[in-house]
Image (spheres, rainbow, N blue to C red):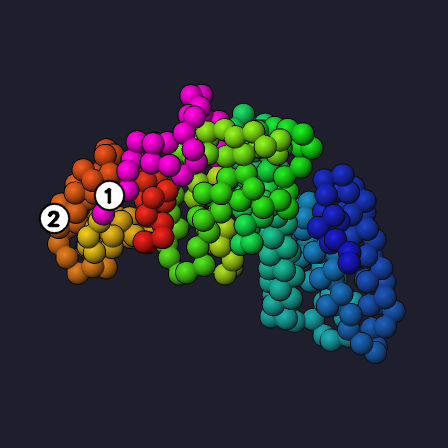
Amino acid sequence: MIDLQRIWQPGNRVRVLAVSGLLMLGIALLDWWTKSYISLGFLYLFPVMLAAGFLNRWAIATLGATCALLVERFGALDSSFTRFSLEALALIGCGLFVAELILNRRISAEAQEKLHALVETSPAAIVTVDEHGSIEVANRAAMELMAPRDGNLRGAPIAAFLPELHHALRWEEAPQFRASMQCFGHRGTGEAFTAEVWFSTYKEGQRPKVAAIIVEHSEESTAEPGSAAADGHARTALNARELEVLRLLVQGLANKEIAVRLAISGGAVKSTLQQLFGKTGVRSRSQLVRVALEHYRNLL
């Protein structure tokens, strides 16, 4: 399939403008030659669209008006100012539309290139996980952290390296949420390490995905993965309201949204959160989310 966007690459400016000019000349000659039979004025759309990718708005307007004049001059019908105005508006509008479309594509491509360069040069490991739990994107730092032997992560299951991150995928309808956690990970060599993970859920169409930044913790723990001693938070029994508030908190809802969902007051939500802070031994919402994901996931 032909990639039309390549036509308007900056290096093609002179050639495309030359082709556009030749097309205009050819259409004008053909229109003059077939004047008594058929009008070919609609063909001027093609040189206008070709040139629009390299011209400013005033130049596009001038080009469109020029093509409309050629239509009136060599067309089969008698000259009409009304028809000329409509033809000029149509050609100019088409040119401006193509110009804006190409400009937006260029801006998007430049932004993607800058983002890609930023991700690749980041000292922190950055990965995205698709709906199947497979690593979709991994920068150089992620490969050095988790797969130092073969340097290949794309397509590998994230559960083999960071099992907790695999469980962050959510198929149910729920708002995007962001959280951080400290967990145990495994390198491709089999070596274990402690990681600080900041992750965010999102959806691409109907497919859930996770984006994460991973940093190796400087103080590695010798506790077993998943044990309460690993982070000092034992699993304490929670009542029904505490579990409901915790579930909505993990989904990223604010206090007011939680209150509306549960049909309780904002003060009741704050009181329940204070109870959760006391039971889990944490001081912030992000720490509470981490504890919820590590110790209460099956209950949520």
State how many labels appear.
2
Q: Counting other residues with Cα less than 10 Å from the Cα at mark 2, is it few (<14), some (14-19), or many (20 or more)?
A: few
164 sits left or right of 100 in the view: left
Residue drawn at x 81%, y 44% as measured from the top left: 15
Work out which quarter of the rendered image holds the N terminus and state it.
bottom right
Residue drawn at x 58%, y 46% as measured from the top left: 157
Is 217 located above or below residue 33 in the figure? Answer: above
Asked if marks 2 and 1 touch (Cβ < 8 Å), the reply is no
168 or 96: which is nearer to us?
Answer: 168
Give the residue type at disc 2. Answer: Gly
**Residue 217: percent from left, percent from top:** 45, 25
Residue drawn at x 77%, y 42% as measured from the top left: 12
Q: Which residue is mark 2?
A: 267
Q: Which residue is mark 1?
A: 236
Work out which quarter of the rendered image holds the C terminus and state it.
bottom left
Q: Look at the image and say whether residue 89 sits in the magenta stretch.
A: no
Q: Look at the image and say whether residue 231 sits in the magenta stretch.
A: yes
Question: What residue span does the magenta drawing correspond to?
Answer: 213-237
**Residue 23: percent from left, percent from top:** 81, 57
216 sits left or right of 89 in the view: left
Cα separation, mark 2 vs mark 1, equals 23 Å
Is 219 located above or below residue 204 in the figure? Answer: above
